[in-house]
């Protein structure tokens, strides 16, 4: 009996399952008459996946959702499947590259593409961050593939199936030759894999995009008004339908949000505090820092109506048992905050002379709350407890001063490191 896959037949996340099925000798069929945005909102579908995402695999035991889990399930149906490698170590490496593809490749392709299609807000800093993150990931992948034909071992594994499907969507949309030419081993790997007979059967011919899609128009062009006509009995005219972007199945979402005209922070009333002036003062003050940069600088510049100050404390400090891992964790957080550089200033302190190390921070944000796009895009934000600074509390104000100037000891402990986001 065939397994039933609920998704559109061009969804690259569904295609992972079909390729895995080809290699595993498993029969999988698409659900009949599936329509994205309609079928996945029905009560029957929501019983299989309550949040309405696709794909979903219908099995004799029950439904399975999330595309990588579906591909794993299908692969497991064949005993001793070589798609899982030939040893426990190879299996771990396969899982490693699946996670790499899912966290470093796929989401950054989406962060580059989807705003240009109008599915989410287009923010140039966010796009720059997505592109730089992709280049970093491609660099690591290119290095690995310089001496490896496949991701693991000497034949196709599940890692190659998932990686190739994620890359194929990118190659067809935003990963132009101008981007990929810097990574020749990734190019060679991709074309080698997708031209394997079982891949080609499912994916067909793939043409690399020649250009990145333009940013979706923020508003439709104004329609010229027709001159008034005398009223007469005639059939009412139907309003012309505006073409809207079709729901993109690779978003795996119930509905795509509408794009906004610009970052809401740019629409706030002007503030007397000019963030770049504060950043320059911070960087250029070399002596009498507390007096010059803080007492007569920051606090005279600070505008509580246009900006807000926040303390953050890492929730899982007991896990910070290795110094360089903790420092890398903070460095990664600051890198992901790059999309907010125009609207924020931050200090992150790593505290303690021995493990476990404490991570605490101070952030200045444009607006009277933490920007929503930061909370949405930077997953690390959820790893911290956030508390707004009460500038009328002298103790909290002094804590701000000490964090800005990297005061040591801080709260009775030495600093392992202090990092600035400016």
Image: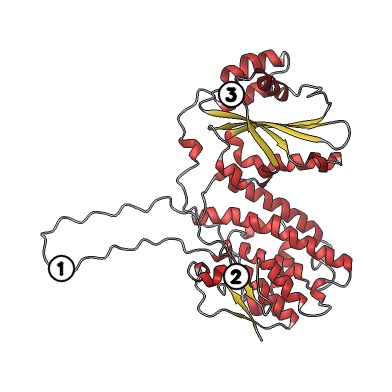
Determine which residue is flagged by label 2. 48
**Residue drawn at the location 47% of the way across and 28% of the way down:** 270
Q: Which element carries disc 3, helix, strand or loop?
A: helix
Which residue is denoted by mark 3 in the rendering?
277
- In the rendering, at what x and y percent does residue 58 appear? 63, 76
Q: Is residue 256 left or right of residue 163?
A: left
Q: Is residue 412 above or below residue 266?
A: above
- Asked which secondary structure carries label 1, the reply is loop
The answer to whether the residue labelled 3 contacts the one labelled 2, judged by CB atoms less than 8 Å apart, is no
Q: Is residue 380 above or below residue 366?
A: below
- Give the residue at x 64% y 74%: 57
- In the rendered image, residue 288, in percent from the top left (x then y), is placed at 72, 13
How much space separates mark 1 and mark 3, taking CA atoms? 65 Å
Position of residue 341 measured from the top left corner of the image (x, y, whole percent): 61, 36
Q: Residue at x 82, y 41 (%)?
A: 318
Q: Nearer the viewer, residue 65 or 200?
A: 65
Residue picked out by circle 1: 234
Residue sitting at 10 percent across and 59 percent down? 230
Residue 181 visible to an observer of this rendering:
no
Q: Element at badge 2?
A: helix
Tell me the CA gap for discs 1 and 2. 49 Å
Residue situated in front as seen by the camera: 82 or 217 = 82
Give whichever of discs 1 and 3 has the lower sequence position.
Answer: 1
CB under 8 Å between discs 1 and 2: no
């Amino acid at each position: 009996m065939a397994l039933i896959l609920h998704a559109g037949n061009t969804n690259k996340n569904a295609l992972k399952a079909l390729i895995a099925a080809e290699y595993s000798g498993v029969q999988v069929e698409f659900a009949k008459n599936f329509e994205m945005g309609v079928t996945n909102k029905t009560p029957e579908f929501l019983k299989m996946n309550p949040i309405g995402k696709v794909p979903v695999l219908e099995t004799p035991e029950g439904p399975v959702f999330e595309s990588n889990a579906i591909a794993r399930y299908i692969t497991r149906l064949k005993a001793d499947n070589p798609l899982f490698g030939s040893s426990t170590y190879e299996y771990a490496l396969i899982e490693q590259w699946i996670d790499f593809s899912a966290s470093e490749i796929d989401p950054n392709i989406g962060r580059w593409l989807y705003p240009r299609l109008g599915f989410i807000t287009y923010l140039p800093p966010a796009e720059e961050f997505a592109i730089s993150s992709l280049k970093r990931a491609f660099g690591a992948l290119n290095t690995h593939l310089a001496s490896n034909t496949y991701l693991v071992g000497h034949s196709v594994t599940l890692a190659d199936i998932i990686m190739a499907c994620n890359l194929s969507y990118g190659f067809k949309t935003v990963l132009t030759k101008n981007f990929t030419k810097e990574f020749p081993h990734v190019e060679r790997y991709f074309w080698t894999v997708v031209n394997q007979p079982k891949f080609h059967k499912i994916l067909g011919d793939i043409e690399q995009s020649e250009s990145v899609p333009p940013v979706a128009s923020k508003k439709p062009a104004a329609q010229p008004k027709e001159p008034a006509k005398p009223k007469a009995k005639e059939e009412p005219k139907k309003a012309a339908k505006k073409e809207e972007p079709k729901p993109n199945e690779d978003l795996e979402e119930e509905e795509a949000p509408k794009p906004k005209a610009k970052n809401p922070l740019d629409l706030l009333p002007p503030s007397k505090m000019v963030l770049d002036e504060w950043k320059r003062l911070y960087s250029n003050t070399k002596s009498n820092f507390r007096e010059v940069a803080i007492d007569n600088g920051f606090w005279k510049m600070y505008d509580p109506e246009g900006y807000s100050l926040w303390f953050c404390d890492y929730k899982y400090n007991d896990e910070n048992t290795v110094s360089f891992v903790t420092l890398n964790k903070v460095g990664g957080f600051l890198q992901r905050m790059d999309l907010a550089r125009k609207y924020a200033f931050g200090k992150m302190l790593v505290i303690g002379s021995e493990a476990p190390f404490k991570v605490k921070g101070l952030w200045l944000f444009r607006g009277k709350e933490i920007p929503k796009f930061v909370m949405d895009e930077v997953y690390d934000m959820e790893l911290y407890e956030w508390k707004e600074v009460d500038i009328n509390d002298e103790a909290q104000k002094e804590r701000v001063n000490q964090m800005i100037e990297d005061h040591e000891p801080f709260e009775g402990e030495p600093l392992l490191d202090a990092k600035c986001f400016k």
